[in-house]
Each structure stands twice: as C-alpha cells, then as structure tokens.
Amino acid sequence: MSGIWRALTRDELTGGANHETAMFGAFAPNFVQRMMIVIGKKTVLKRGVFRGSYTWLIMCLSKGPLDILFRGCAYRIWCENNLIEYGLLLNPDYNHADLDFLLKDAPETANFVDMGSNIGLYSQPMAKVGHKGKTISIDANPLMATRLMFNAAGSRLKNLTMVSAAVSDTDGRGSLVIRKNDVAIVAVEESTDGEIPIRTLAAILDEHKIKKIHGLKIDIEGHEDKALVPFLMGAPKARLPKKIVIEHPTADADYPGCTKAFAKLNYNLVGRSRNNSFYELTP
C-alpha cells in the first residue's frame, strides 16, 4: 500500500453521533441544490478535480445529508470525504463502463459479489438487475455496511445481503487503516487482536449458498491477491465468476497473483477503465 495510512477512529468506524434514521427522501435536494446538481452534471464541475469542492458547496445549502438517485437506486450521501459520493451526485456516467460490463447479459436470477462495497455503487445496480438472484456485498468498515443497508432499504432491494468483514486467504482478525482521510480508501491490516473479522470468500459464499456467480467486483486496496486468488484456484468451474471487475494498481497492469490466476483459468482481459480491469471467463 502506497501513501500515508492511519488507523480509523471510533467515530469513523461507527459514524459517531452522525446518524439519521429518517426514511429515504427526507433529505431531498432543495430547489437551489437541484439546479446546482444539474449544472454540475453538464459542465466540467463533474470532473474529479472539481467534484469534492462543488459537492461541499451543494451540501452547505441545507442541513444534514442528501438523498439522491443513481441508476434508479437510492443513496444517502454525507459529504464526509468519500470520492464515491461525489461521483454519484455529479456524474451520471460514473463508472458506467464498469457497471455495464458486469450487468450485460445478466438474467433476473443472476448472483453477484461486491468486495469492498462501500455504500453500494456497484451492489445496488447489480441487485436491481439480478432481482431474483442474490447479491453479496462485503465491506470491512461497519459504517459503510450500515449505510449500504439503509440505501438498499430505500431502493427496496430485498435480495442484497451485507457481510461486514474483511476477506483474505484464511479466517482471522484485523484492523482498518485509511488513506487521504477518504472513507472510500480503507484497507485491512491483519492482526490477532484486531476488531474486524476476516473471512475467506469461499466460506462467505458457502454460508449464503451461492454456487454460481455472474459478476464479481473487487476493490480492497491491495488485498486482492490474498482474497481472490485462493478462491479462484480452489473453486469448482461452475462457481467461477463469469465476469470480474478488479481495481488495477497501475494503468496497464493488474495484481500479480490475480494476473497468474486469470491466465490459468482462461479469463480474458477485455478492457480497462481509469481504475479497473475487466475480465471475462472463456466458456
């Protein structure tokens, strides 16, 4: 992991006093905020370099969070230095190529897995498309798990299951660290006295009786090799995800362990976005 990391505070893990139980829609944007959001979506203000500051300005025009829709799903955003929230608010095409790849040709019964789910950027659209299947959302940050489930309730998604744990090659414990004070950039450090449970992906899927996976997305800040490779190499062929979206550590290369596993299992690299690589399993 590059950059400066620090341990999460208790408030960052739980939200402290910053909770709001009002039903989704209670914090709809006001007229001025709606106009500013429209302007942002149609101008350079939707770009990453401007999104954080512009989101802050929008949020200052009301008290509390904002309730918005993205790809027909409900999201309550808090403007607490979460890059994902900025994208959801201001960029209607945010990660669209990644999502479109995962969702293409997915039947109503499709099962999905979202590792590093945050507030549900991927989980909710996946659960909406595979509404007769199961979507397993996994995130080690308890606060993100709480907020994702609130969003899923607002979207009336009953087929989304939240697993509040980290994923690695063995069961254990760990602690969370954060980079750039951004709750979208949180990683796990394995330690015997950590307060975060660590589980294997195979065990999680066994528990929820997932035998087939249409699409899997993974973004867990450098833990990809330890979390994904043992599962892929030990899974029966029928359980291998048909499509995988994985964060790439550099623009033109993927994590070494995953790269080797993909080659052995006949996954083809079919594209890359700014942050992720797209792999599809050869029949």
Image: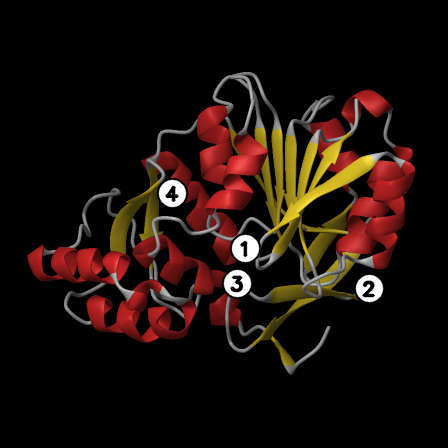
Across and down, in percent, residue 243 comes to 68, 34
Across and down, in percent, residue 249 comes to 71, 64
Q: Any mark on residue 151, and which? A: 4
Quadrant in which the C terminus appears: top right
Picture residue at 54% right of the left edge, 55% below the top: 142
- Mark 3–mark 4 CB contact (< 8 Å): no
Picture residue at 41% right of the left edge, 37% below the top: 152
Picture residue at 76% right of the left edge, 54% below the top: 224
Could you tell me if residue 199 is visible in this image?
A: yes
Q: Nearer the viewer, residue 173 or 230?
A: 230
Q: Which of label 1 and label 2 is nearer to you?
A: 1
Amino acid at the residue labelled 4: Asn
Amino acid at the residue labelled 1: Pro
CA separation in Å, label 1 and label 2 = 19 Å
Q: Is residue 190 above or below residue 178?
A: above
Which one is earlier in the sequence, the residue at label 4 or at label 2?
Answer: 4
Q: Is residue 165 above or below residue 274?
A: above
Which one is earlier in the sequence, the residue at label 3 or at label 4?
Answer: 4
Judged from the image, the secondary structure of the residue bearing numbered disc 2 is: loop
Residue 137: quadrant of the picture: top right
- Mark 2–mark 3 CB contact (< 8 Å): no
Judged from the image, the secondary structure of the residue bearing numbered disc 4 is: helix
Q: Which of label 2 and label 3 is nearer to you?
A: 3
Q: Which residue is mark 1?
A: 142
Q: Which residue is mark 2?
A: 192
Q: Is residue 253 above or below residue 129?
A: below
Q: Which of label 4 and label 2 is nearer to you?
A: 4
CA separation in Å, label 1 and label 3 = 13 Å
